[in-house]
């Protein structure tokens, strides 16, 4: 009887161990980041900046890839650019009120900036991650003076990436 009970306990523990195993969770999908809305008129341009702050020595940094985008208040894509940003460097995209948005006179358009990460991110052996710090500037075109600076840090959840079982 003891041998039978012993075998049942071993079988139960083995079965419980199989059910307790789980598949590793997929890597989190980086969220798209956006600014708030800002108005632009003729004679102004907006610039989205993406800074890769890098890391301090002796570690090595990761080159970040992303898409810089401008959309209007209705979410319509106005302009975009794919960028690769090395550690300690930055990239930018400009949108001009007169040339790109065809604004004239007192016409005004609400826009926002977005930084969209790539769908697939390759992990590095060092475990370093990609970080881009975004800002949106509104600039007076004739003088070159920056009128407003907004952060591009509000996260918009990205759709989950399906995984193969």
Image (cartoon, grey):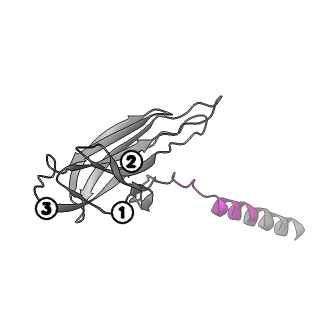
The residue drawn where x is 13% and y is 61% is 107
In the image: residue 100, left or right of residue 146? left
**Disc 2 or disc 3, which is closer to the eye?**
3
The residue drawn where x is 75% and y is 63% is 13
* Distance CA(mark 3)–CA(mark 1): 20 Å
Q: Looking at the image, which residue sits at the far right?
A: 2
Q: Secondary structure at mark 2?
A: loop
Mark 1 Cα within 10 Å, few/some/many (few <14, many 20+)? some
Residue 30 at what x, y percent from top left? 46, 52
User: Which numbered tag is attached to residue 36?
Assistant: 1
Q: Which residues are magenta?
A: 13-26
The residue drawn where x is 37% and y is 59% is 35
Residue 55 at what x, y percent from top left? 59, 36
Mark 2 Cα within 10 Å, few/some/many (few <14, many 20+)? some
What residue is disc 2 on?
Answer: 119
In the image: residue 1, left or right of residue 94? right
What residue is disc 3 on?
Answer: 107
Q: Secondary structure at mark 1?
A: loop
**Disc 2 or disc 1, which is closer to the eye?**
1
Q: Looking at the image, which residue sits at the far front?
A: 143
């Amino acid at each position: 009887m003891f041998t039978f009970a012993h075998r049942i306990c071993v079988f139960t523990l083995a079965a419980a161990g199989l059910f307790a195993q789980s598949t590793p969770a997929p890597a989190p999908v980086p969220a798209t980041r956006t600014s708030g809305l800002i108005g632009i008129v003729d004679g102004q341009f907006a610039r989205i900046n993406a800074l890769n702050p890098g890391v301090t020595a002796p570690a090595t940094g990761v080159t970040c890839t992303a898409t810089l985008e401008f959309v209007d208040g209705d979410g319509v894509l106005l302009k975009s650019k794919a960028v690769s940003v090395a550690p300690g460097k930055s990239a930018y995209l400009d949108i001009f009120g007169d040339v790109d948005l065809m604004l004239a006179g007192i016409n005004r358009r609400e826009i926002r900036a977005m930084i969209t990460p790539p769908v697939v991110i390759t992990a590095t052996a060092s475990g370093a991650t990609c970080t881009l710090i975004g800002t949106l500037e509104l600039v007076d075109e004739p003088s070159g003076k920056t009128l407003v600076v907004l952060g591009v840090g509000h996260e918009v959840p990205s759709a989950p990436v399906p995984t193969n079982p």
